[in-house]
Amino acid sequence: MISDIIIGVGMLLVLIGTLGILRFPDIYSRLQASGVSDNAGLSLVLIGLIVRGGIQSDDIALFFLLLLLLVTNPIVTHSIAKSAFIQKHRAGDRQ
Amino acid sequence: MSTVEALLILSVVAVLWRLARGPTAWDRILAYNSASNRIFVLLATISVLTQREGYLNVTIVYAALSFLGVIILARFAERGGGNR
């Protein structure tokens, strides 16, 4: 019950992020859509899976996966934004 | 709960469209990162729903390797390989 609500909210955020990646006009806007709503939505889906399974032995693996997602996704977003900024790709360039 | 898997597959296909279409190289890197994130959450969902604990180890290794690949691609585009 509670896990269904958490997974539903997470999937809504993931679908909003997918729509943002598809429809936003610029690389920085797409990075913002990906970095904010994907991180929150996929983390909520993983938290919902942890809540659904109960206390089992695979909760450690799911928690480690959640920790890995929360650590690596901001690093990736920052690295792509820094790479695009160093290569003189400014905001508003509709390519 | 198979609705979650269907929606995740749908969003993976939608993000892969951005990977095929993307105007610059950074769009493709971003789409690859988003697609691999969705794919490992989909693997974790399948693992929990079908009670197969072995899939979770595969998922952790896949997440770590995709993070390494995205960082390497972003650093490569930073040095000037991103014009293609």
Image (cartoon, helix red, strand yellow):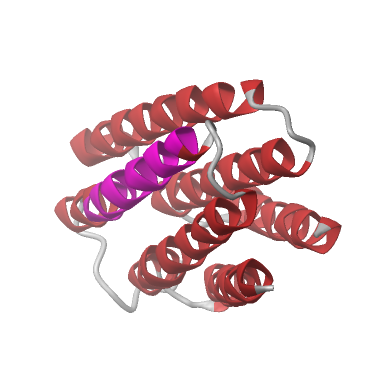
Asked if A64 appears above or below A49 in the picture, the reply is: above
Answer with the quarter of the image where residue B65 lies.
Answer: top left
Q: Measured from the top left, where is residue B62 in percent x and y?
A: 51, 27
Looking at this rendering, what residue extends furthest in the left direction? A86
Q: Nearer the viewer, residue B10 or A90?
A: B10
- Residue B79 horizontal side relative to residue A76, left or right: left
Residue A36 screen position, x and y as percent: 37, 70
Instruction: Give the total of numbered labels.
Output: 0
The image shows residue B71 at horizontal and vertical percentages of 30, 35
* Residue bounds of the magenta highlight: A60-78
Tell me residue B53's x, y (percent): 64, 26
Residue at image point 53% right, 44% down: A55
Asked if the stretch drawn in magenta spans residue A47, the answer is no
Does residue B83 appear in this view? no
Residue in the picture at 50% in, 67% down? A41
Horizontal arrangement in the rendering, residue A84 relative to residue B4 (left or right) = left
Q: Residue furthest front?
A: A55
**Up-down relation of residue B60 to residue B13 (above or below):** above
Q: Is residue A63 above or below residue B18?
A: above
Query: In front here: A16 or A50?
Result: A50
Q: Main secondary structure of the magenta part?
A: helix
Quadrant containing the N terminus of chain B in the rendered view: bottom right
Is-magenta flag for residue A71?
A: yes
Q: Nearer the viewer, residue A39 or A89?
A: A39
Question: Is residue A45 shown left or right of residue A1?
Answer: left
State which quarter of the image contains the C terminus of chain B: top left
Q: Is residue A67 visible?
A: yes
